[in-house]
Amino acid sequence: QSVLTQPPSVSGAPGQRVTISCTGSSSNIGTVFDVSWYQHLPGTAPKLLIYDNDNRPSGVPDRFSASKSGTSASLAITGLQAEDEAYYYCQSYDNSLSGYVIFGGGTKLTVL
Amino acid sequence: QVQLQESGPGLVKPSETLSLTCVVSGYPISIGYYWGWIRQTPGKGLEWIGSIFQSGNVYYNPSLRSRVAISIDTSMNQFSLKVTSVTAADTAVYYCARQFGYVKHFDSWGQGALVTVSS
């Protein structure tokens, strides 16, 4: 069971907007630690989509955006395309125990 | 452009030691950044194993700390992972990645190496 909670699946039609939530706690997202998001196609390297809560690396389309509020974060994808079908993971840091990097359980996005 | 490539045996027997190496090209690992290992077990999500800095300063996932060792060889521009006393639960795709800071994001990843633990 992951420390960060994501819905197992979301879906949307081409052109639509979908959001993926990432719920944490006061020992991770609810503190100073940033949230990042990754896109992952099985068999390939995960790709960084968002870092430091709401920043896109160069080359990531502006259809992808994210935000953080309180103990949660969310990723939004607008203008959904077939190529967006993948798994999406949030990631942060937890300062319990001796501190460790944490990932969400992942969300499968299906483009209908 | 930095590239990372994992290598190592794809099959390990139970109770033995899993060893993987990540060769980095296009960027000297002695300059900034942390270098990490992450795994994905079958049907599950991503799990951070640990990260190391050029100085050898290393951070581990508390759940794996007793069985894991990460080392770095700046002369060979590579870093390595050892997991001891493996069981079937350690069967996973193992990724190496470059990390912006030990509490931060991973900006470049290897393709992953499947390691199966089986007799």
Image (tube, coloured by chain):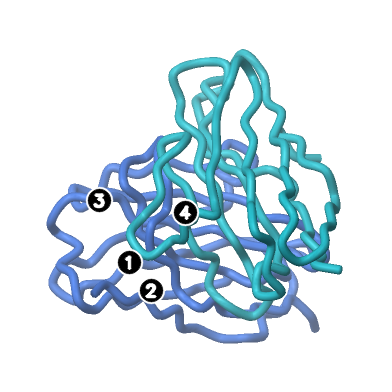
- Tag 3 and tag 1, C-beta contact below 8 Å: no
Q: CA distance from mark 4 to mark 3?
A: 26 Å
The residue drawn where x is 14% and y is 59% is B30
Q: Find disc 1 in the rendering and name its residue.
A: B79
The residue drawn where x is 68% and y is 25% is A24
Asked where in the image residue B12 lies, by quadrant, the reply is bottom right
* Label 4 and label 3 in one chain: no
Where residue A102 appears, x then y in whole percent? 59, 39
Q: Nearer the viewer, mark 2 or mark 3?
A: 3
Q: What hue represents chain B?
A: blue
Q: Residues within 10 Å of mark 1 (few under 14, many from 20)?
A: many
* Label of residue B33 in the image: 3
Q: Amino acid at mark 3?
A: Tyr
Q: Find disc 2 in the rendering and name its residue.
A: B22
Q: Amino acid at mark 1?
A: Phe
Chain holding disc 4: A
